[in-house]
Amino acid sequence: MRVDRSRLPALGPERPFTFPEIRRQTLGSGLRVWTAEHRQVPLVSVLVLLPVGAAADPAGRPGLAAITADMLDEGCGDRSALDVHEALGRIGAQLDTDVGYDATLIGLTTLGRFLDQGLELVADMLIRPRLEQREFDRVRELRLNRLLQLRDMPPALADRVFAQLLYRNHPYGHMPIGTEGALRALTLRDITAFHRRAFRPADVTVVLAGDAPHETLADAAARAFGRWTETPGETAFDDPLGAEPPAPPPNRLALVHRAGAAQSELRIGHVAESRKTPDYHALLVLNMVLGGQFVSRVNMNLREEKGYTYGARTSFEFRRGRGPFVFHASVQSDVTADAVRETFAEVRAIRGDRPVTRSELELGRAALTRGYPRSFETAEQIARAAAQLALYDLPHDYFSTFVPMVMALTPEDVTRAAATHLDPSRLLTVIVGDRERLTPSLASLEMGDASEVAVG
Amino acid sequence: MNIPFTKHTLANGLDVLVHEDRACPIVAVNVWYHVGSKNEITGHTGFAHLFEHLMFEGSQHYDRGYFHPLQEAGASLNGSTNADRTNYWEVVPTNALELALWMESDRMGFLLPALSEAKFENQRDVVLNERRQNYENRPYGLAGMAIVAALYPAAHPYHWLTIGAADDLRAATLDEVRAFFQTYYRPRNASLALAGDVDPRRALDLAEHYFGEIDGGQPAPPVAAAAPPPLSSEIRMVLEDRVELPRLYLAWHSPALFDEGDAELDLVADLLASGKTSRLYRALVYEQRIATEVAASQNSRELGSFFQIVATAAPGRTLAEVERAISRELATLVDKGPTASELERCLAQAEAHFIYRLQTVGGFGGKSDQLNAYNVFKDDPGYFARDLARYRSATASALRQMAGRYLRPAQRVVLSVVPRGRLALALPGSGPVAVS
């Protein structure tokens, strides 16, 4: 039988998907141990979540949370820095430390048969880091070098200036890596004190997903972390996110000059909502339509119609506090002003004269929901999904309610979310590019003079 | 340890590989065309990759872009081009398998009727943007071009990177696109792998149904490239770039993918620069603190590989110091070989990575991609276990021997990338190279 190419084949019946069961228990210290079985491949992914990240950096100490986390594997317990890494290498483990604004995540993936060794290393990193002066000096130097190199990377520059101008003194107003001045001023005592205050078992969730029964995973975690008890006399961390983000900056156009830049790196956005917003699902769908997938409005316009860029996208960065809505693209220098104009037009249109249509809604909802099981394919994905529940205090049935909640949204819901949560008058535009090539056309935007931001 | 599969070749020459994995209700569809930038010729570089872009712009029976129906079905999808091959993949919910096969087969069989000058012009602009974003505007972004241009003679198809030269991209024509499609995008030159929540019999029937009607085409012409002559002496070059810290690149010719010595040199790369206890990291970054980062890799390819070491000098330190330290470590390795303990660590890491590769059915590097790689390069989709055996059987003396044979000081390309206007920071004796 020949293929019927007059129309696309219809989708078959949807296959049911059961989300992995997460079992939860709490050790005497208050440390939570969550487990999920994933028996396909003989490995285990361990994820330690500490809900303290760069937003908790004290005033004048940007970069403290990140460098503290970086010091954990530089010697701990009975092992020197090199011994830690030799031990990790010998079990073929992959260690990944990630400090975001809201949390520190330490991930370890290893073969199931090495689970105990892997957990012992991770537990030592958290409980008994050596935090030695010699290692601190070296790690700080590497971070300073990294900062130096980031000055030449347009995406990193754009992210940094965007966060600074948008959030200023708010905890989201600096990059997790911090600044050169702050890193130079840090002392080992800052690290030790931060570690003592922030690394408390009662705040930590350890997620284990992999090729062993729940009981085996939980017992292994209890063996490794059972010895961790509260340090007496330490006060709990104040939630740094009580503060409201500041009002938008008066000048909405900022330029970081880069002579001879081959392209302009763009960020356009404003402060938006926190992860706990009741409009979370509506904003996800809105973003799919506006700039969250290849066929979104901004990518189809700027890449596929205009050829201005290799790719354009938008996102709502959902955090514990109010994260930004942001547009990202790197565009040809000569069309920078046009790209900014088109982006503003798309934001205006979706909350104005071109609201989300029924078919766009259906596409956005379908893309989010039909592909949802894909996010639970590997042990590490499962562990990361579970950690999101812990970090944002989401309900236990969150995964199974996700699809019905998205599918219940109407075009009106999404249009209302656009009207409520997008505001063209508050958009801040940051451009990293060549001033000489840009200045004439930027005037045509009628956004006032660009404030030039020096980066040093 | 392996990836169980069935293989069947359709009458038109298309290989169909199927791997069943019912854990998650998804199926990976993965197509390899055995064509890459190595099939290009001088003056027409960047073409295979530009062509890949056009494969997402619609085909005769669905000419409204490739992404829309698949994203609506919940798929993720992408494609990539390298020197040796071009791959395309979708990971779809089980119920959208037929949709993905319909779409892939339509662009394999019926791309050209939907191709227009407007699409071509647009995607050429997109690719030029990609080139500016990822190469010209990125620190050290042009180093790779200088390295391969020095390693391979001008007529050798590894002389250029897959992204190609901007002028060549501007000169490309729609007629070339048509000829390229007819020459290389034929079932006979392709391999289809399906992995995931599907019955192997049904998967094969569906593949036969959707792809069986496409004309198999002629066998693709072989690549006419003479083996690159060995370097007769060290080549030292310098490139100025908008960077803060000078960086040193060392590159050597090395055995082709799967040839004798390939796995050993991959292990040598790990031994040198994977993890803090690797020799170069430990010496340069941890102990002497003369470099801020170091990496080593065996870049395995069909016609011949290259081994590369990259190190960025710490502020105030010189590339000459960095070069001396690297050369010293290499000399020691060649002289004494790895220790038993080092080899154990590298093998444990290599073996673990083979297992980590079994986690996903689709996407770049997933099981379907691996089946196609082994099928296209070794004509054996079941090569996984033998591939692993190459590593398991590597010995300390073989590592030492291969390092000695291939990583010779007198047969390497050395590139210094230095901040603009600071040519004095390059290794002594380096000649300026022009790359754009």
Image (spheres, coloured by chain):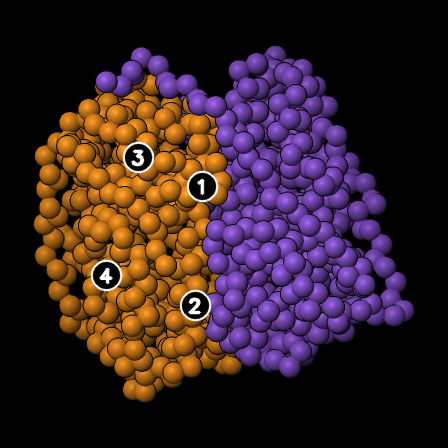
Q: Which mark is residue B349?
A: 2
Decide which of tag 2 and tag 3 comes sooner along the chain: 3
Query: Which chain corresponds to the colour orange?
Result: B
Q: Which mark is residue B201?
A: 3
For the residue pair A24 and B166, the one nearer the viewer reads as: A24
Name the chain letter of the residue that bears numbered label 2: B
Badge nearest the viewer, 1 or 4: 1
Choose top left, top right, bottom left or bottom right for residue B405.
bottom left
The residue furthest bottom is B336
How much space separates mark 2 and mark 3, taking CA atoms?
A: 36 Å
- Name which residue lies at 30% across and 46% down: B5
**Residue B261: percent from left, percent from top:** 24, 69
Badge nearest the viewer, 4 or 3: 3
How much space separates mark 1 and mark 3, taking CA atoms?
A: 14 Å
Amino acid on which the number 2 mark rests in the picture: Gln
Q: Which mark is residue B22?
A: 1
Q: How many marks?
A: 4
Badge nearest the viewer, 2 or 3: 3
